[in-house]
Image (cartoon, grey):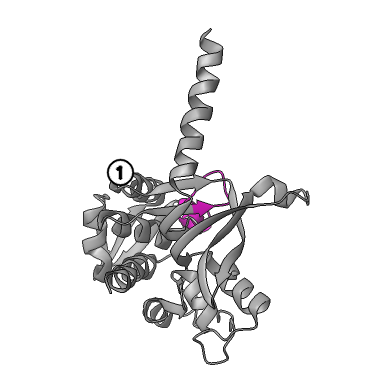
Amino acid sequence: MIERKVSQGIISTYFNKLERNLDLDVAIVGGGPSGIVAAYYLAKAGLKVAQFDRKLSPGGGMWGGAMMFNQIVVQEEALDIIKEFEINHELYNENLYVMDSVESTAALLYKAVHAGATIFNCYSVEDVIFKNDIVSGVVVNWTPVLREGMHVDPLNIMAKCVVDGTGHDSEICRTVARKNGIRLATETGDVIGERSLDVIAGEEEVVNGTKEIYPGLYVCGMAASAVSGTPRMGPIFGGMLLSGKKVAELIIESLKR
């Protein structure tokens, strides 16, 4: 019966996909634009990468543009990335370009998957695997399980590198510091917390703050701002895209060594 075949096709191929991703080069936590860009460049380099996002629709806040006006702005410094992802854009003022936020987010996801990245939606990362003082993977559960407060044990996924792309809350860095009594590579040794909005400083510092924050743990996007205590930047996304590319380059170089 076709009804059975439909269910069987979904179940068998899904569990094959999950099993293929139990041992990764890179696990990216959070489905925002920075993490998606990182997934694209990592997969393009031939690395085994999976991205885990708690929402039904990965993409972070990029879908909604600014205050649900579904347009976003990028600066000229990120234009090469925009062109590589084949996103329509138009010059608005000097070195600023505007793009449709829905097209942009969809393009990032499409390109990342077609480069070879696997994206899991409806997954929450509730912890990391911490072995020999190195972040060595992620601990995952269904998002609805955690939201309902159900006491259901998670699954473990190994990874050579973990990227915290969880945005303003920098959840993974907070968890690693809190649970293991370690110092992150920040001024205080902990998550400092993002400062109020300053577009120029925010755009510069989100890229500067993209780095390995602890052995095996990298940070990008707004999580980088939150960890290092730098300003947020609002609905301008060049820094997000550049941060994603930078963290991919850092990981590629590290794994080569």
Front position in the image: 10 or 155:
155
Q: Can you say whether 36 is above or below 224 in the image? A: above
How far from the left and from the top, in percent, is residue 151? 78, 51
How far from the left and from the top, in percent, is residue 245? 31, 66
Front position in the image: 27 or 207:
27
How far from the left and from the top, in percent, is residue 160? 42, 65
Q: How many marks?
A: 1
How far from the left and from the top, in percent, is residue 222? 49, 70
Label 1 environment density (alpha carbons within 10 Å; few <14, some 14–19, many ≥20): few
- For image coordinates 46% across by 60% down, the residue present is 28
Would residue 127 be found to the left or right of residue 43 on screen?
Answer: right
Q: Would you name the residue on which mark 1 appears?
A: 114
Front position in the image: 27 or 186:
27
Residue that sits furthest to the top in the current view:
1
Residue 48 seen in this snapshot = yes
Residue 69 seen in this snapshot = no
Would residue 100 be found to the left or right of residue 15 on screen?
Answer: left
- For image coordinates 35% across by 45% down, the residue present is 113
Quadrant housing the C terminus: bottom left
Residue 63 is covered by the magenta coloring: yes
- For image coordinates 34% across by 50% down, the residue present is 112
**Which residues fall within the magenta stretch?**
52-68
- Tag 1 secondary structure: helix
Would residue 249 be found to the left or right of residue 25 on screen?
Answer: left
Front position in the image: 150 or 193:
150
Query: Callout 1, which amino acid?
Result: His
- For image coordinates 55% across by 13% down, the residue present is 3
Residue 218 is covered by the magenta coloring: no
Q: Can you say whether 85 is above or below 246 in the image? A: above
Residue that sits furthest to the front in the current view:
132
